[in-house]
Amino acid sequence: MKAHKYYSLLIFTTFLMGVAFPVGKIGLIYASPFLLMGVRFVLAGGVLAVWTLMRRLPQPQEASDWVKACVIGLFQSAGVMGCAYYSMHWITSGESAIITSSSPLIVVLFGTLFAGVRYRPLQWLGVIFGFAGIVFSFGAHIGLHPGTWIGLAGAVCFSVATLLIKRWGGRFHMTVLAAYQMLFGGGILLLMSLLAEDAYFNINGTSTAVVLWLAVMCSIVQFSVWFYLLNAGDPGKTSSFLFLAPIFGVLSSWLLLGERCEWEAIAGGALVCMGIYFVNREQTAVQRHIHEPG
C-alpha cells in the first residue's frame, strides 16, 4: 500500500472513531446504551453481510471460522463500544475517547506477553508515558467514577481484538469479517440490553439520524477500513495512530456538545498522545507468532 493512501485512510478512520463518541452521547439522550449499540451493529452488520453475499465475496466455510468471527465481535463491537458508551454515564465523551484510545499501549503489553512480539526501549517508554497520562488525567477521582474503569475495560477489549484480527484475519476477507463481527457483537449487546438494563428507545428525527450515522459511517465504513489497515500492516504501528481518535473526539465533543475538558484531562491526554507517538516512532517489532493462523 502506498504511504499517502495508508496515512489518508488512517486519518479518515480515526476521525470517524473520534466523532462516534459525541454522536453516541447524543444518542444516549434517546436510548439506553446497550440497546443503542446493539441496534447500531445489528443494522450495520446485517447490511454489510448482505452486501458481501451480493458481491459473492468468500464467506467463512468452517465452523471454527464462524467461532473466530464471533469472538472478535465479542471484543471489538460488544466489548469496546459497549464499555465506551456505558462509561459515558459517569464521564464525558472526550474522556471516554481518551481512555478507549489508550489501547495501543496495551497492545504493546499483550503483544509481548502473548504474541511473541519484541519492542525496543522507546516503545516501552511510550507505554510508560501513556499510562502516566491516564493516571494523571483520572487518578485524582478514579475511585469516584466507575466509568473510568469501564472505559479501561473497553481499551483492553480493543487491544485483544487488534491482536486477534491480525492473528486470524488472513482466514477472512476483511469486509466479510467486519460484517459478521458487527452482527455477532450487536446480537450480544441486544442480549445484554435485555438482561442488564432498563431498555428504552425514543424514535424521532435526531435518534434516527444518530443511528444511521453510527451504523453507516462509524460502523460499516470505519470497521471496513480499520480491518483492512490492520491486516495490511503491523498492528502496533497501525493502532498507534489511535492517538488521533481522542483528539478528534475531544474537538468534536466541544463542537457538538459544548463539553469542556479539565486541564488535568488535557495534560494527561497530551501524555497519552506522546506515549503513543513513541510507540510508533521506531516501530521495529519482530513478530514471531502473530502471523500464524490459529
Image (spheres, helix red, strand yellow):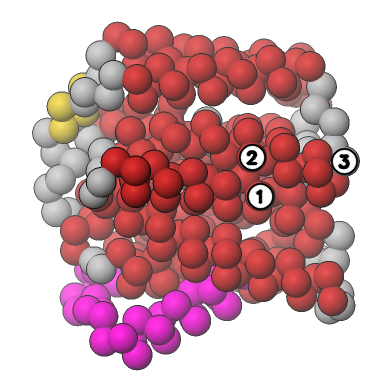
In the image, 289 versus 254, the foreground residue is: 254
Kindly check if marks 2 and 1 are in contact, taking CB atoms under 8 A apart as contact: yes
The amino acid pointed to by label 1 is Val
Give whichever of discs 2 and 1 has the lower sequence position.
1
Estimate the x, y position of residue 208 in percent, counting from the top left: 76, 75
Q: Distance between the residues labelled 3 and 2?
A: 14 Å
Kindly identify the amino acid type of the residue bearing the numbered disc 2: Phe
Q: Is mark 1 on a helix, strand or loop?
A: helix
Name the residue at 71% across, 36% down: 250
Q: Residue at 28% of width from left, 19% of height from top?
A: 282
The residue that disc 2 covers is: 248
Q: In terms of sequence position, does the residue under pointer 3 or pointer 2 come before the other?
A: 2
- Secondary structure beneath label 2: helix
Q: Is residue 133 visible?
A: yes
Classify mark 3: helix, strand or loop.
Answer: loop
Q: Give the range drawn in magenta.
A: 40-66
Magenta stretch: dominant secondary structure:
helix
Does 47 lie within the magenta span?
yes
Question: Which disc number belongs to residue 19?
Answer: 1
Q: Quadrant of residue 107?
A: top left
Q: Which of 115 and 284 is in front in this view?
A: 284
